[in-house]
Amino acid sequence: MTGSSSDSHPLPAHVAAIKENGFAQWSGGAAPAGLEGLFEDTGIPVENIRHVRIWGLQVDDERELPGHERTSIPDEEIWQVTLVAKDGSHFEVNSELLVPASERH
């Protein structure tokens, strides 16, 4: 597994635990809708972890959003985990959806 952090973006504890384990499980116990059956139930291989910044939005035109002279959606920073499915395909998911697998494979 690859993945790194920099001084400006150290790995949060839950992400570091997933990286150290090398396998993850869904935090809710089951895969999110649309991903059921694609992954192993006991531990999903983790290929990569990376820090991602999702740019927000600001609208300054009242004609676009009546009643709102300035509307903004803040930037969001997440840790993205690349998971390997049973068929070898890769899926990138938000680390908040995962926990470290309870046992190594």
Image (cartoon, grey):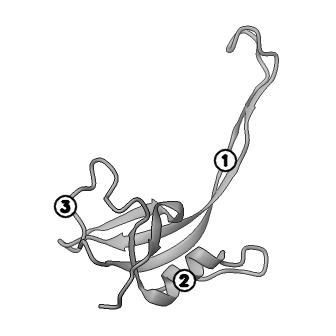
**In this orientation, does residue 3 appear?**
no
Specify the amino acid type for callout 3. Gly
What residue is shown at x 49% (from left), y 80% (from top)? 18
Specify the amino acid type for callout 1. Trp
Q: Which residue is mark 1?
A: 55
Cα distance in 3D space between marks 3 and 1: 32 Å
Q: Which residue is mark 3?
A: 37
Label 3: state its secondary structure.
loop
Q: Give the quarter of the image for residue 104.
A: bottom left
Label 1: state its secondary structure.
loop
Q: Nearer the viewer, mark 1 or mark 2?
A: 2
Label 2: state its secondary structure.
helix
Front one among 88 and 39: 39
The relative height of residue 35 versus residue 7 in the rendered view (above or below) is: above
**In this orientation, does residue 42 appear?**
yes
Which of the marked residues, 1 or 2, is nearer the chain's N terminus? 2
**In the visual, does 20 lie left or right of 59?**
left
Which of the marked residues, 2 or 3, is nearer the chain's N terminus? 2
